[in-house]
Image (tube, rainbow, N blue to C red):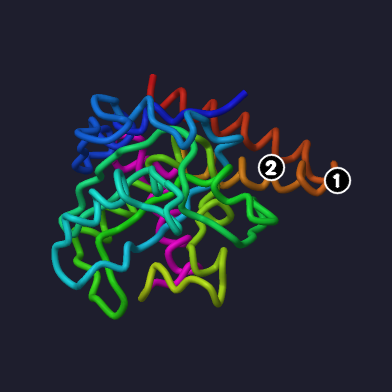
Amino acid sequence: MSVWLTDLGDILRKAHVPVKEMVYQQGKRKGMHWSKVGFNNRGLTEFRGIMWHHDASPHGDSPGALSWLLYYANDNGYDLTPAAHIWVDRYGTWWIYAAGLSNHAGRGSSALAPNNTGNQFYLGIETDHGMNEPWPNAQLDSLRVGTAAIMRAYNLDPMKALEFHKTYAPGRKPDPDGLELSEERKIVDRIIDTSDENGKKVSRIRRRIRSWRRKRDQIRASGRRKGLPTVRKRLRELNQKLKKVTG
């Protein structure tokens, strides 16, 4: 069963980032709402992570880049639209234009998407940005907050699920230029730890619950059972504390 990410607009609005939901104005998809759009009318195989890109546009505002992603992206005449799923402009607005499969990753590999399968498993986020261009605070802050919101909604761990095009395809791709994956993973993880789906600060108890859940998942993934009863007990205790606090 394929995956269509039709709730992205709602998730991002709850996180208080600006959102534009696209309806195609020309070409073979004219009149289609973004929630119905996927390459060859297909959805993702599975939603495993988010990949950041830059569109390599000239420095400054480049609104024409969005049109290229929607209507004109091609490889030697072969139609690649939609190219990625979302474009984030320099002011932090998220322009959503695809919910299903899209072309953005190409040849490469990661722990979550080996052997050139990135398109099948990653949500692709393009940004209005070029090589050696400074990142506007509004754009970068919104990119981080929106990414955290989507990962929280789909229970993705940014320490694994956030990927860069340049780390997926090293030597072939340089984007997003000027950012380090290890640092951005930590920042997105911190946002998830310290805020809820509405962007509000969360209590220390909720942060501790998330930390213990991560320990539980790590133990399960390792195939070991040692330590699992302790983790489960601690989670029960913390959830009981949370219920008392929240009523």
Instruction: Check whether the beta carbons of the residues at disc 2 and disc 1 lie within 8 A of each other.
Output: no
Q: Is residue 157 left or right of residue 100?
A: right
Which residue is identified by label 2?
A: 217
Identity of the amino acid at label 2?
Answer: Asp
Within 10 Å of the Cα at label 1, are there few (<14), some (14-19), or many (20+) other Cα atoms?
few
> Dot 1: what SS?
loop
| Vertical order, 35 against 201 (above or below) | above
Residue range (magenta): 179-204
- Residue at the image point whose x is 32% and y is 62% from the top: 55
Location of residue 206 in the rendering, given as x and y in whole percent from the top left corner: 46, 39
Residue 84 image offset from top left, x and y in percent: 40, 48
At x 36% / y 76%, what residue is drawn?
A: 178
How many angstroms separate mark 2 from mark 1 (CA)? 11 Å
Residue nearest the viewer, comparing 11 with 50? 50
Q: Is residue 43 visible?
A: yes
Location of mark 1 (residue): 224
Question: Could you say whether the residue bearing mark 2 is in a helix, strand or loop?
Answer: helix
Where is residue 26, by image quadrant?
top left
Up/down of 53 relative to 192, above or below? below
The amino acid marked with disc number 1 is: Arg
Q: Indicate the quadrant where residue 20 lies.
A: top left
